[in-house]
Image (tube, rainbow, N blue to C red):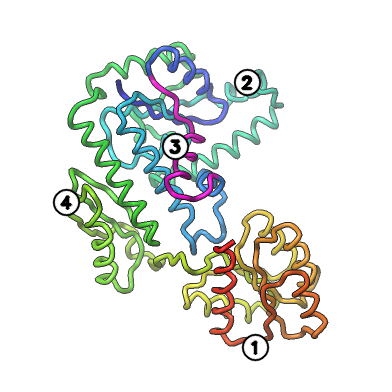
Amino acid sequence: MSDILLFSGLFCQAESVVKRLLDDTRCSLITDSDIVAEAAKLSGMSEKAIAKAFVSKGSIFNKFNHEKERSVAWLRLALAEKLVKGEALLVSGFSAQLLSQSISHVLKVCIIDDVHKRIEVARNEEGFSEKEAIKAMQRSDEERSVWVKELTGEKDPWTSSLYDMVVPVDKIGVDESVALIKEQLGNAAVQITDNSRQEALDFLLAAKVETALVTKGHNVEVSAKAGNVVLTINKKVLLVDRLEKELVELTQPLDGVESVEVTFGKDFYSPDIYRRMDFELPSRVLLVDDEREFVQTLSERLLMRDLGSHVVYDGESALDIVKDDEPEVMILDLKMPGIDGIEVLRRVKASRPNIEVVILTGHGSDQDKKVCMELGAFAYLHKPVDIEVLSLTLKEAYAKIRKA
């Protein structure tokens, strides 16, 4: 029996459609939580980190550590491994968008509903007020729009071009919606064939290649057909021959790979420069200093040494990021307007003791140093600092984190 990938908006009666389909077919339900749990097992990443891929508000550090891209790659592999097992599946949720290659026996369904009907469902079935329902729908639709655009390039998550069928539940009701989906499951075009099984294996191979590459710090698009793998680079490359050689050398030895071709996508000539992620280096470094010109220059000098950092100019902003985004290492000035560095250090170590804090100050005293070290600072450095000394200190702080 064919598989179903079902995507919908919030309060679109998708749960009712899914329940009826499970009752009326031999499909087994696969949720986002199931895919996340499997991806975490495969990757060694935490479920919390993997699940962040679904959230529209990306990490400020993602351009340095590619965590979202890594999570998506492992999510794809988790889905691919389930699709090749032969059991009829109903995959519901964000994970329904992970299919990056055509598998003809997979029926892609979008469930949509009229706004007024969605509000009615939210009020009657979930106990929301109209204002609460509208706010929840707007937030949910934004997350789905960002997710779909990141995976497919489409701005409209409900566009018919992404699906085999778009079902307007508000117009035809749950019963008729289920009947239409079941009717399409019987269509000859979505039956399992030798070709469709090969398509599923192609998707699995592409997912395996993608995870093998992200594990080595690379972020490229991958497709496969009967063992022939195509790698597409979508960012500007400074040493393209070297990158092509490395990608081929990493891909060619993988089981199932017959040939490797490297191509260049539509964004190859964009201003962004392709950077390979080095997992031996910290990538979630937060610079906190009110001297704007100094700290911006420092951030650029660190980036030249492949140490990505985000800059804020006061203690309040630093604490907000610690709360929402969890940096690995902080470089912290002491004398700042508002909350000073010692108080920031105290609060960070109280709430996130695993974050290593390097004090970098031009005004500190011996007593300040004593207090900072007692509060748990990793190191205490003075301005002006030798960039190599600071880089080494960051690497040592990160090594301590990785050993913990």
Question: Is the residue under label 4 in contact with that under label 1 (CB below 8 Å)?
Answer: no
Task: Residue 202: give x, y in percent of width and height.
Answer: 24, 41
Q: Earlier in the sequence, mark 1 or mark 2?
A: 2
Q: CA distance from mark 2 to mark 4?
A: 54 Å
Q: CA distance from mark 4 to mark 3?
A: 29 Å
Q: CA distance from mark 1 to mark 2?
A: 62 Å
Q: CA distance from mark 3 to mark 2?
A: 26 Å
Disc 4 residue crowd, few under 14, some 14–19, many 20+, Cα 10 Å: some
Q: Tell me: residue 370, above or below residue 97.
A: below
Q: Which type of secondary structure does the marked residue at label 3 adopt?
A: helix
Q: Quadrant of residue 84 in the image?
A: top left
Q: Position of 356 compared to 272: left or right?
A: right
Mark 4 lies on residue: 258
Farthest residue toward the front?
A: 403
User: Where does the magenta region start and end?
Assistant: 27-47
Residue 216: which disc?
A: none
Mark 3 lies on residue: 95
Residue 384: which disc?
A: 1
Q: Earlier in the sequence, mark 3 or mark 2?
A: 3
